[in-house]
Structures are given as C-alpha cells and as structure tokens.
Image (cartoon, grey):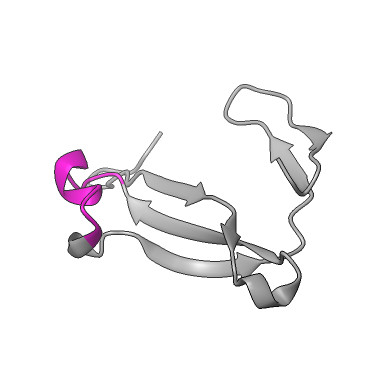
Amino acid sequence: MLPEGATILPIMAASDKTPVTSHTGGLEMHPLFLTTGNIQSDVRMKATSHAWNLVCQDRFSSTILLGGPGMQGTNEEVSPDT
C-alpha cells in the first residue's frame, strides 16, 4: 500500500535497431529511450516534442529478457539481424 499523498508515475521504454553507416561493416546500434506515461500519446509521438530521452546505446544486443509483472522472466536468444 502506498503512503498517503504518494504518486505512481509510469515509465515507458523503447528500443529499435539502427544502422550506423555503411562504412562500419553493417554495425547496428540499439538505442534505449525512456519517457513518462503522463504525457499524452499524441504529444509523446511527435519527434519535435522531445518527450523521449536517450538513455544508452548498445551495439551488442543479442539477448532480450522477457517478463513483466506477474510473469516469470525468461531469456530468449535473438540473432543480431532480427
């Protein structure tokens, strides 16, 4: 139970593979972006709103941890080109 006056703030994460350049031998980066759930979706999805913040970039993403509240997390191997 939350204390009186507490606030819950949903946090959303998103990632997608991005090719760096053709001069890197097909190197792909996997940027991780975060935003808060209290921003209206039409505002959040506009690139000019700057609602998403870049947290990190990973070029070695080959394992994804699947899971969530009420779910048992499992590791699933993913090939780098998927």
Above or below — where is 50 with respect to 15?
Answer: below
Identity of the residue drawn at 22% across and 45% down: 38
Please provide percent x and percent y for residue 20: 59, 70
Above or below — where is 53 with respect to 37?
Answer: below
Asked if the magenta segment contains residue 42, the reply would be yes
For the N terminus, which image quadrant?
top left
Identity of the residue drawn at 19% across and 63% down: 48
For the C terminus, which image quadrant?
top right
- What stretch of residues is rendered in magenta? 37-47
Please provide percent x and percent y for residue 24: 71, 75
Above or below — where is 55 with respect to 14?
Answer: below
Identity of the residue drawn at 40% across and 48% down: 11
Please provide percent x and percent y for residue 17: 59, 53
69 or 20, which lies in front? 20
30 or 69, which lies in front? 30
Q: Quadrant of residue 56?
A: bottom right
